[in-house]
C-alpha cells in the first residue's frame, strides 16, 4: 500500500515539465523556482513551526542553495526547453551518476549488478538521445546534467546530516532559504531585463494561475509532505519503486497536454530505461527474501 502512496508524489513531480510548458511557457525559470519553493516552505513552516539551531544554519544554506535554488531553476530550464517525456525519463539516470560520484569521491566501488545495469542504462540513454533520431535543445540537456549533479551532491550532504536535524525542519528551511535565494536572483534579473517580468505581469491569466497552483500546492507542498511522511514509514528501496510514476507521468502528461509523440522504438527505449533503473533494487529485494527464507528453513530444521 505504501508503494502505491509513494507513486503519488512521484507522479506529481513528473508532471512539472508538461504543466510548466503548457501553462507557463514564457515565465523566467528563476521566478518559477522562487514561486515553487518559497510559498511551499512557508506552508510547511505554518503546519509545523521550527527554528534551526545556530550551528545548523550553514548546512541548511548549502542544502537550500543546491537542492532548491540550483535544482529548481535547472528543472524549469529543462521544462521549457525539452520534451516532457525526455525530461522525465532522463532524470531516472540519477542512480548511475550517484554510483560514479561515490566511486570517485568515496572510493566506494559499485556492486556488479549495479555496474551492469548502470552501463546498460547509459547505452539506452545514448540511443534515445541520439541527435540522429531526435533533436534536443543543448541548453536543456546541460540543465538536465546539472540537475542530476544537484541531486547527487545534495543527497550526499543530506545523508551526512544523519539525524542531527529533524527531517521536516530540513525540508522546510531548505525550501525557505533556497526560495529566498531564487527570489533575490529573480529580482536582480527583473532589474536587468524588466520587459520579461512586465510581460508576465500584464499577460497573467487563468491558465497561469492554475499552473502555479498545481506546481505550488500539489507538485511541491503535497508532494514533499507525502515524501517526508512516507520516508518515516517505508524504506528508501520501497520508495524507489514508487518513483516509477515520475517518468510515466512525464510521458503521459507530455502526450496529453503538449501532444508529444515518439516512435515505438523510442517508447521502447524509454520503457527499457525505466526497467533498468529499478532492476538492482528488484534483484536485491529477491535476494534478501531468498536469504531470509533460507534462514527460516535452517532455523526450523535446527529446532527439530
Image: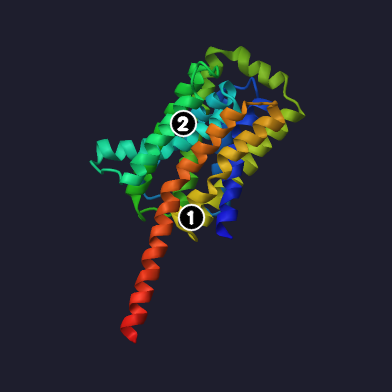
Residue situated furthest right in the rendering:
206
Alpha carbon separation for disc pair 2 and 1: 24 Å
Q: Give the image location of residue 170, x and y in percent.
A: 44, 48
Q: Give the image location of residue 127, x and y in percent.
A: 47, 25
Residue at x 55%, y 17% (from the top left corner): 135
Q: Which residue is mark 2?
A: 124
Q: Give the image location of residue 244, x and y in percent.
A: 54, 44
Residue at x 71%, y 32% (from the top left corner): 256
Say if residue 62 shows up in the picture.
no
Say if residue 196 shows up in the picture.
yes
Residue at x 50%, y 40% (from the top left corner): 175
| Up/down of 188 relative to 59, above or below | above
Q: Secondary structure at mark 1?
A: helix
Q: Secondary structure at mark 2?
A: helix
Which quarter of the image is occupied by the N terminus? bottom right
| Up/down of 87 relative to 154, above or below | above
Q: Which residue is mark 1?
A: 238
Residue situated furthest bottom in the rendering:
304
Question: Left or right of 211: which side holds 247?
Answer: left
Q: Quadrant of residue 259?
A: top right
Q: Residues within 10 Å of mark 1 (few under 14, many from 20)?
A: some
Which of pointers 2 and 1 lies earlier in the amino acid sequence? 2
CB of mark 2 within 8 Å of CB of mark 1?
Answer: no
Amino acid at each position: 500500500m505504501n508503494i502505491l502512496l509513494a507513486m503519488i508524489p512521484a507522479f506529481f513531480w513528473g508532471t512539472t515539465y508538461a504543466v510548466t510548458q503548457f501553462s507557463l511557457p514564457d515565465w523566467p525559470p528563476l521566478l518559477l523556482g522562487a514561486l515553487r519553493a518559497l510559498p511551499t516552505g512557508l506552508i510547511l513552516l505554518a503546519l509545523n513551526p521550527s527554528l534551526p539551531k545556530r550551528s545548523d544554519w550553514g548546512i541548511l544554506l548549502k542544502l537550500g542553495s543546491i537542492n532548491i535554488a540550483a535544482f529548481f531553476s535547472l528543472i524549469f530550464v529543462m521544462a521549457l526547453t525539452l520534451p516532457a517525456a525526455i525530461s522525465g525519463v532522463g532524470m531516472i539516470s540519477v542512480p548511475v551518476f550517484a554510483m560514479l560520484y561515490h566511486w570517485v569521491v568515496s572510493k566506494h566501488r559499485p556492486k556488479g549488478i549495479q555496474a551492469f545495469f548502470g552501463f546498460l542504462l547509459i547505452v539506452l540513454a545514448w540511443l534515445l538521445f541520439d541527435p540522429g533520431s531526435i533533436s534536443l535543445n543543448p541548453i536543456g540537456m546541460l540543465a538536465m546534467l546539472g540537475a542530476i549533479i544537484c541531486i547527487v551532491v545534495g543527497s550526499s550532504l543530506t545523508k551526512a546530516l544523519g539525524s542531527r536535524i529533524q527531517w521536516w525542519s530540513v525540508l522546510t528551511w531548505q525550501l525557505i532559504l533556497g526560495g529566498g535565494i531564487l527570489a533575490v536572483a529573480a529580482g536582480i534579473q527583473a532589474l536587468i531585463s524588466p520587459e520579461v517580468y512586465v510581460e508576465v505581469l500584464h499577460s497573467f491569466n487563468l491558465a497561469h494561475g492554475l499552473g502555479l497552483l498545481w506546481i505550488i500546492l500539489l507538485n511541491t507542498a503535497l508532494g514533499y509532505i507525502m515524501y517526508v511522511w512516507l520516508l518515516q514509514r517505508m524504506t528508501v528501496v520501497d520508495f524507489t519503486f514508487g518513483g516509477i510514476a515520475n517518468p510515466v507521468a512525464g510521458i503521459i502528461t507530455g502526450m496529453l497536454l503538449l501532444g508529444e509523440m515518439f516512435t515505438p522504438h523510442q517508447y521502447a527505449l524509454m520503457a527499457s530505461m525505466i526497467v533498468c533503473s529499478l532492476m538492482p533494487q528488484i534483484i536485491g529485494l529477491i535476494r534478501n527474501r531468498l536469504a531470509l527464507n533460507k534462514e527460516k528453513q535452517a532455523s526450523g530444521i535446527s529446532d527439530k
